[in-house]
Amino acid sequence: MTLFEFIFRLLRRIKIEIISIINRMYTYFILKGNGINFKNFKSNGVPFVAVSKNGNFEIGIDFKMNNGLIGNPIGRPQPCTFVVDSNAHLKIGNNVGISSTAIVCHLSIQIGDNVKIGGGTCIYDTDFHALDKKKRMNSKTDMLNKADKPVIIGNNVFIGAHSTILKGVIIGENSIIGACSVVSKSIPSNEIWAGNPIKFIKKL
């Protein structure tokens, strides 16, 4: 290693450590400011969080998240995104790790303990819009007629990068979702599923 390379890597490490301290403080401020019930956490980068009035968001112990390019350099970088609508409930269990994940909760999303969620995954418990084209023409009727159904992700689940979990889905304990899957139906426990549309691969 040349002297230049050594200095460059040393300065890069110092920069990362300083940014990490600042980001952790800022993330703590964001979580507290949104009224989130949390304990200890680790965060690379800063998430986007928006909890509406009367929305509820709680996080268990040992929560870890990677945000953006520095925290998750595997492609398609973005901050983790948490949106909790009014009267909705988002619960994340203990020892959960996520990277560049978007979770939009309009009703109820529950994530169990020891869950790992790969980079770029999106979890939605809503269709966002009405399916009837006439109702979509008016913003009020559009929102009033959108479909919301709870999402439940069991303990020890592993969700591969860039997957999408849609409303009404239950993923059973210990199951694995392959990368880039679209999960539109519930998955039993102890199985591997993957694809778009998602298909059964094998039992664990």
Image (spheres, rainbow, N blue to C red):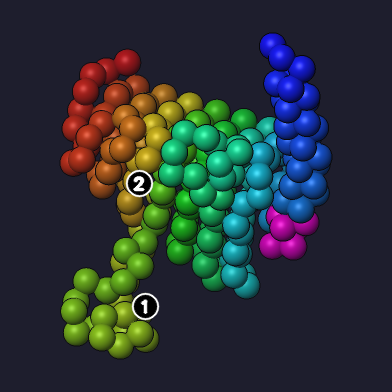
Residue underneath mark 2: 165
**31 relative to 153, above or below:** below
The answer to whether residue 127 is seen in the rendering is yes
In this view, which residue lies farthest toward the top? 1
Residue pointed to by mark 1: 143
Q: Which mark is residue 18?
A: none
Name the residue type under label 1.
Answer: Met
What is the x, y in percent for residue 157?
44, 29
Range of residues picked out in magenta: 29-35
Left or right side of 47 for 110: left
- Residue 193: x, y in percent? 26, 29
* Closer-to-camera residue (64/192): 64
Which residue is more in the foreground, 169 or 103? Answer: 103
Identify the mark nearer the N-term, 2 or 1: 1
Residue drawn at x 48%, y 26% as measured from the top left: 156
Question: Where in the figure is residue 197, as x and y percent of width and height?
Answer: 18, 41
